[in-house]
Image (cartoon, rainbow, N blue to C red):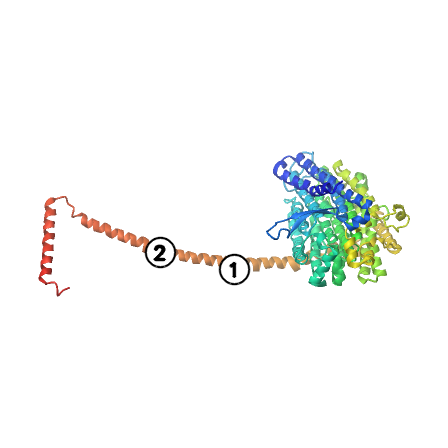
């Protein structure tokens, strides 16, 4: 396939979903069937084009790996944006495709397409309007009233993520980044009329505002980093900025401290978007949106975009870490702490989706920590595999909830929470397809050895951390390794807990007793994603792995993705450093492998022993409540982060807004100034009015009155009698004659 065709295909990848958004909003929003068919067509086009471009990149690499390492971008096309006089090329936007773009396109387009197919069944297309459909509330017995709106927003979401993935610069990446922020707000609050009696349970509209405002904190700091990036490099295009020459010039210009500051400013965007501590609090509440939205946020887009950003700017981060050790501490510390913290919280959650939400936060922490210790490929590998099995798990949880809601309709019980795992049990026989696919996703999340994709990607992160900590003697890597090991143990434990509480034993409520398998729109995507959750990891089997390594003979994922940054990294750090920084998967060791296997199987076994060996009976409390005591309450309440933020930030901000901004600034300063100006102009206007009334209007009226009075007096002279006119004329004549005589005689000289 020619480069021109690949370039055209790349430009068209995000066009389908973006175009569908406008078509649904403007034309087809009243036709639900046509709306979802258009949405399918849009993502289907992106799926086909994305796979064509990605496979073309893979074939080019297979044909000539060295050429692709020297020229990693198989597609790069851009044009001037806002050309102004001599600054014609001051900003350029365009598309590019390299190995990282290719593997991300495979994951994103596949998972999004599966989610779109699933969504038709989830929103009960074809089941009629239901008994009491209410816009902005879930419609459990019929099609969602806002069915078309949902697919319009989801199409915009998909298109935004694809814009971000194929972007060649921080400018267009930020456009897709912010569009996804808008879409998350619209879709988390999709059921805007839904409310809860529990004041601690955020309704969707409040959760949407929380997500939007929290991520804006990271985005604003990231925008400062983008401005600083442009100031230093003179461009926002990745290929131009991350050449060895450009990076060396940047170091000379601002020094190691400036590069470190730039990297951390940009990393702040990842902290917000990928829900890393301390901006992690929005993601669990984002579960208030429909389950397909949760799957898109947690797997195909949104949070994956944050990790994709730091992978895309990895050369900058690597240079910053080399020049300032504090960068590694900040990024690695945040990632490792988030991974452990979120895993411990997930252990004590009962909402089937909230467990997965904290699981996502934890797994994203793995990726962030991996980037900090230089495990570029391992982080990218886990990003891809995690996208597949986390999409599978979220769609599986939606299928579970769907089945429970069907049970609620049959028994007319709308008070029992269909998302609470304590109300489930026994769904293995009720929902066999959902059970087996969810089990595959859970095993992949736990890193079950050999047969799941999660094992290969998670094990590589642990292997790099082990080698960096033991072989190279880096204390931070050693701490990160054991922190991630503990997080992996907790992950396997809460996964076994979730599967046991949901599927094993006997139904604990009437909802579970009357649950049934979901429709094919929902189950077929589960089966497809379960295949990727099992086999996607085989693309990255280490060459030195026993038996399987020689069998596959070539770690394709490692060598393929390494071409993205191989040349500039070699030029900057030299070939020896490349082995530790980029090709980290090559560092195979039996010790982290054994630890990873023991932790995964051990955590699963402990979870099954606690919850699955003797499944819970109806209303039986969680077995962890008694042994953990106050610690269980602490974990169940999410380390009290929301309450702490409420005290430290939310309440002071509201108080500041109410007292200072509203009372002093708005009402006191702004309103006071406006009212003062208003009163001043009113007073001036009053005196101008009085001047107009008294001087202008009054003077004219007085003059008019005098003229009228004079006319009234002189009017009496005109009687119409000739005799009187003659008499008056004679008198006037005599008076004039007398005056003339007096003047001539000089009588008046003494007077005048």
**Residue 589 left/right relative to 694:** right
**Quick one: 247 or 342, which is closer to the camera?**
247
Which element carries disc 2, helix, strand or loop?
A: helix
- Using the image, tell me which numbered label, if any, was put on residue 669: 1
Which image quadrant: the C terminus?
bottom left
Q: Earlier in the sequence, mark 1 or mark 2?
A: 1
Give residue 414's quadrant in the image.
top right
Which residue appears at 54% of the width and 60% of the height? 664
Question: Could one spot residue 705 in this view of the protein?
Answer: yes
Label 1 and label 2: CA atoms lie apart by 31 Å
**Which label number is shown at residue 690?**
2
Screen quadrant of the N terminus:
top right
Depth order, front residue of 496/734: 734
Q: Nearer the viewer, residue 434 or 593?
A: 593
> Residue 696 at what x, y percent from top left?
32, 54
Residue at the bottom extreme?
750
Q: Secondary structure at mark 1?
A: helix
Q: Nearer the viewer, residue 517 or 218?
A: 218
Residue 136: x, y in percent?
A: 64, 42
View extreme (right): residue: 547
Which residue sits at x=12%, y=66%? 750
Label 2: few (<14), some or many (≥20) within 10 Å?
some
Disc 1: CA contacts within 10 A as few (<14), some (14-19) or many (>=20)? some
Determine the image quadrant of residue 531: top right
User: Total label count?
Assistant: 2
Q: Position of residue 666 (x, y in %)?
A: 54, 57
> Residue 232's x, y, as percent?
67, 58
């Amino acid at each position: 396939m020619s480069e021109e065709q690949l370039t055209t295909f790349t430009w068209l990848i995000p066009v389908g979903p973006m175009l569908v958004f406008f078509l649904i909003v403007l034309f087809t929003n009243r036709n639900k069937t046509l709306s979802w068919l258009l949405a399918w067509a849009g993502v289907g086009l992106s799926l086909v084009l994305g796979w064509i471009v990605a496979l073309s990149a893979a074939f080019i690499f297979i044909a000539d790996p060295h050429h692709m390492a020297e020229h990693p971008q198989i597609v790069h096309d851009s044009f001037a944006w806002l050309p102004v006089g001599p600054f014609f090329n001051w900003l350029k936007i365009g598309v590019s495709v390299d190995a990282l773009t290719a593997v991300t396109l495979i994951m994103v387009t596949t998972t999004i397409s599966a989610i779109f197919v699933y969504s038709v069944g989830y929103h009960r297309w074809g089941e009629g309007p239901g008994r009491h459909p209410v816009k902005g509330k879930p419609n459990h017995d019929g099609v969602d009233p806002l069915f078309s709106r949902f697919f319009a927003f989801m199409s915009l979401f998909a298109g935004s993520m694809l814009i971000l993935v194929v972007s060649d610069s921080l400018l267009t990446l930020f456009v897709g980044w912010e569009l996804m922020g808008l879409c998350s707000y619209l879709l988390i609050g999709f059921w805007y009329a839904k409310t809860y009696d529990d004041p601690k349970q955020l309704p969707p509209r409040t959760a949407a505002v929380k997500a939007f405002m929290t991520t804006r904190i990271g985005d604003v700091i990231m925008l400062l980093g983008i401005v600083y990036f442009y100031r230093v490099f003179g461009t926002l295009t990745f290929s131009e900025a991350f050449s060895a020459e450009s990076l060396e010039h940047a170091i000379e210009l601002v020094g190691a401290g400036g590069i470190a500051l730039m990297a951390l400013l940009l990393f702040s965007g990842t902290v917000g978007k990928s829900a890393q501590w301390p901006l992690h609090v929005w993601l669990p509440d984002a579960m208030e949106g429909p389950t397909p939205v949760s799957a898109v946020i947690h797997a195909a887009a949104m949070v994956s975009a944050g990790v994709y950003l730091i992978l895309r700017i990895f050369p900058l981060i690597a240079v910053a870490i080399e020049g300032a050790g504090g960068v590694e501490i900040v990024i690695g510390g945040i990632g490792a702490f988030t991974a452990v913290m979120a895993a411990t919280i997930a252990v004590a959650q009962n909402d089937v989706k909230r467990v997965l939400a904290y699981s996502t936060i934890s797994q994203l922490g793995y990726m962030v920590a991996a980037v900090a210790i230089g495990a570029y490929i391992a982080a990218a590998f886990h990003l891809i595999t995690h996208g597949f099995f986390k999409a599978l798990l979220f769609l599986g949880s939606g299928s579970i909830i769907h089945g429970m809601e069907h049970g609620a309709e049959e028994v007319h019980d709308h008070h029992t929470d269909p998302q609470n795992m304590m109300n489930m049990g026994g769904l293995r026989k009720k929902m066999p397809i959902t059970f087996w696919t969810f089990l595959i996703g859970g095993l992949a999340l736990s890193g079950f050895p050999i047969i799941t994709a999660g094992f290969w990607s998670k094990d590589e992160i642990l292997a790099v951390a082990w080698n960096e900590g033991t072989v190279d003697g880096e204390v931070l890597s050693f701490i990160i390794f054991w922190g991630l090991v503990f997080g992996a143990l907790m992950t396997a434990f809460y996964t076994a807990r979730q599967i046991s509480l949901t599927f094993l034993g006997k139904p604990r409520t009437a909802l579970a007793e009357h649950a049934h398998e979901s429709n094919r729109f929902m189950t077929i995507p589960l089966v497809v994603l379960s295949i990727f959750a099992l086999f996607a990891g085989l693309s990255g089997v280490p060459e030195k792995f026993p038996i399987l390594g020689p069998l596959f003979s070539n770690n394709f994922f490692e060598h393929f993705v390494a071409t993205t940054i191989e040349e500039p990294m070699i030029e900057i750090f030299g070939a020896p450093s490349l082995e530790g920084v980029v090709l980290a998967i090559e560092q195979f060791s039996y010790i982290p492998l054994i630890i990873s296997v023991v932790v995964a199987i051990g955590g699963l076994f402990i979870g099954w022993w606690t919850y699955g060996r003797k499944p819970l009976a109806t209303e039986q409390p969680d077995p962890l409540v008694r042994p953990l005591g106050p610690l269980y309450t602490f974990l169940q309440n999410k380390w009290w982060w929301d309450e702490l933020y409420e005290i430290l930030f939310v309440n002071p901000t509201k108080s500041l807004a109410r007292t200072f901004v509203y009372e002093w600034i708005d009402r006191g300063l702004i309103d006071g100034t406006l009212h003062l100006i208003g009163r001043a102009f009113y007073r001036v206007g009053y005196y101008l009015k009085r001047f107009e009334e008294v001087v202008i209007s009054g003077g004219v009226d007085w003059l008019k009155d005098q003229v009228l009075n004079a006319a009234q007096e002189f009017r009496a002279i005109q009687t119409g009698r000739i005799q009187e006119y003659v008499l008056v004329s004679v008198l006037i004549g005599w008076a004039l004659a007398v005056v003339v005589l007096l003047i001539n005689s000089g009588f008046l000289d003494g007077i005048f």
